[in-house]
Image: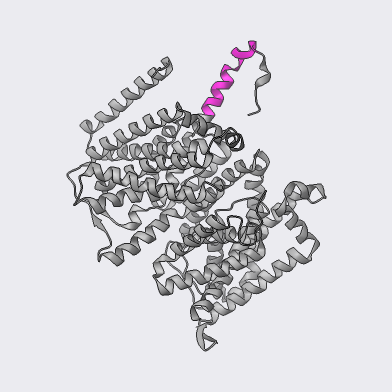
Amino acid sequence: METIVTGILLGGTYALVALGLTLQYGVSRIMNLANGETLVAACFIAFWLFTSYQVSPLWGLLVIAPVAFVVNWAIYMLLLRPLVDRAKTQGMLEVDSILATFGLLFMFQGLMLRGFGGAYTSYAFLAERFEIFGTFYGLNRVVAFVAAVLISSALYLFLYRTRYGTAVRAVAVNPNSASLVGIDVARAAALSFALGGALTACGGALLSTYYTFNASMGVVFTMKALIIVIMGGVGDVRGAVIAALILGITETAVARLIDPGLTLAATYALFTLVLLFRPQGIFGRQQA
Amino acid sequence: MRLSAGEIWTGLVGAFAVGVAALLPLFDQGYYLALALNIVLYAALCTAWTLFSGPTHYVSLATAAFFGLGTYAVGLGLDYLPFPALVLAGGAAAAVLAGLVGAATLRISGVYFVIFTFGLAELVRQVVSYAQTKLSTRMGLYVFTDFTEKHIYWMLLALTVLVFITGWLINRSRFGFAMQIIGNDETVARHSGINTARLKIILFMISGAFIGMAGAILAPRYAYVEPPSAFNPMISFLVVIMALLGGTLRLWGPLVGVIPFTLVMDFVSVRFPNDTSIVIGITFLVIVYLLPDGVTGRLEQLLARIRQPRSHAEPAAVKEPA
């Protein structure tokens, strides 16, 4: 029971990060391998705001999310848009965007190593006990989970209850048909990429309240987010949330019961199962 | 086997270059040998990488995993088996891993393959560390041999030659022809009766085996092998960069990237040790935006433009947009 609750609390943050990636890959068609660096940057900004200005990471989201939105929008317009325009096929765009975001990954990682050093960092925010079903959990984990649920719900309402959200989902299904019904695909793609970056940054800021982070851990989180996205089905919001919870629980269970050093092995075991049995994702439909 | 004049010339020039390279340890045993050893190592790795990733355009990041397996094969078996057998065992272990990864991902799509190989080195590292802590008390393995740098250098040089010959033989076989069709258009390949998944898996295994052998040959240089150094994910990224910088359209393309980039990395890691990842990042961006087909691809484009006036006599309608 304790394992499941801890897993779900962890899965909440994972869901936020993976939602960001699924928007970027599902709608903008950019496989953003520098996604984890956005997360780490958000961790450091939250840390800096908290230690220098005593700004709570929750209020910090109000700064971090818009900044991440603008930065990701600029990255898309300046660097990735030219690749989209020159690609003749989806496969070419995939290879190009993978290599370009590798470049960004290393650039950002190098800059953060310069700025913050390579040491592990953490800070004490709401480090109190909180009781659920007779067991105690860190209050910061619970608060981060609640915030993640609120943000994900807002995203869900935007995508499924607003006109523009429907347009974004239409682009995710088929960009060519979407432009036939008068949707500005290029704008929707840029917006989704920026929004995805903002979501990932929120996940990072929340993660930093209870997790020890360092400048070079982004790759691990990109990996986890990628696997969640594939497990849930590319561009599928509900699938990503459920996959994130499954991953959170599996990881916690493996760390508790077998060995904390095998969390990535657990992730890969899930990934292999998905590839072998449901490569289109949990809720995905078989592609023609 | 019939050889064209061009192939004989390339072979002679190649043999001469290898002969000159093999003489290097007679002149210097210090800094330059160490540098040349790195160049030959990455030449072997990048060419082996290009065997698979050149025709298929799949960016494989599994290099570090294969390399580490080869290193570990030597570390584990040194007390029981002769060194050459261990090199083969390292290659075989890497080929088996490549086969498993290929079977899980290459039947589906290229993106899944990239993602899977992205964390593969880290996965194998975690599993090896876990097995070691469970089965034995020590974290690392000692590799004591009589080999010095120059022996390792010669062995890697021989391996590079072997990779080149294999690549050349593949390119002129039915297998290589099929791979070319797959690279150009996979749907066409499937419709002409090519079992695309199986060929890709076999090619990935061949490429992986050579990388594993390179790791095995390099093991004596480390003397002490432990998971974080053997499965260093940086190797995967460096191989991708150097191969793409040189260009993967030709078998010898990666060489053009390996030599300058090894020198640059050597300079950067001595002068600015904290900024290596920034340099790597910038190089990736340069490749994507300025050199999409690598240096050799760009050179061939220029050559074609210079030759253009001469071929004007022929009807000029077949030219495709660049």
Q: Where is residue B241 in the image (x, y as percent from the top left)?
A: 47, 42
Q: Position of residue B276 (x, y in %)?
A: 43, 49
Query: Is B308 one of the magenta-colored residues?
Result: yes
Is any atom of residue B217 visible in this view? no
Q: Which sits in the foreground, A54 or A141?
A: A141
Q: Which residue is drawn at 34% across and 62% down?
A: B129
Q: What coloring was used for the rendering? A: one colour
Left or right, residue B108 beside residue A76: left
Q: Which residue is drawn at 41% across and 28% down?
A: B168
Q: Is residue B112 above or below residue B300?
A: below
Residue B146 falls in which quadrant of the image?
A: top left
Left or right, residue A173 beside residue A282: right
Residue B132 falls in which quadrant of the image?
A: bottom left
- Report the magenta residues as a range: B298-314
- Quadrant (top left/top right/bottom left/bottom right) for the N terminus of chain B: top left
Q: Residue furthest left?
A: B146
- Quadrant (top left/top right/bottom left/bottom right) for the C terminus of chain B: top right
Which secondary structure type mostly characterizes the magenta part of the structure?
Answer: helix
Residue A73 falls in which quadrant of the image?
A: bottom right
Q: Is residue A80 above or below residue A234?
A: above
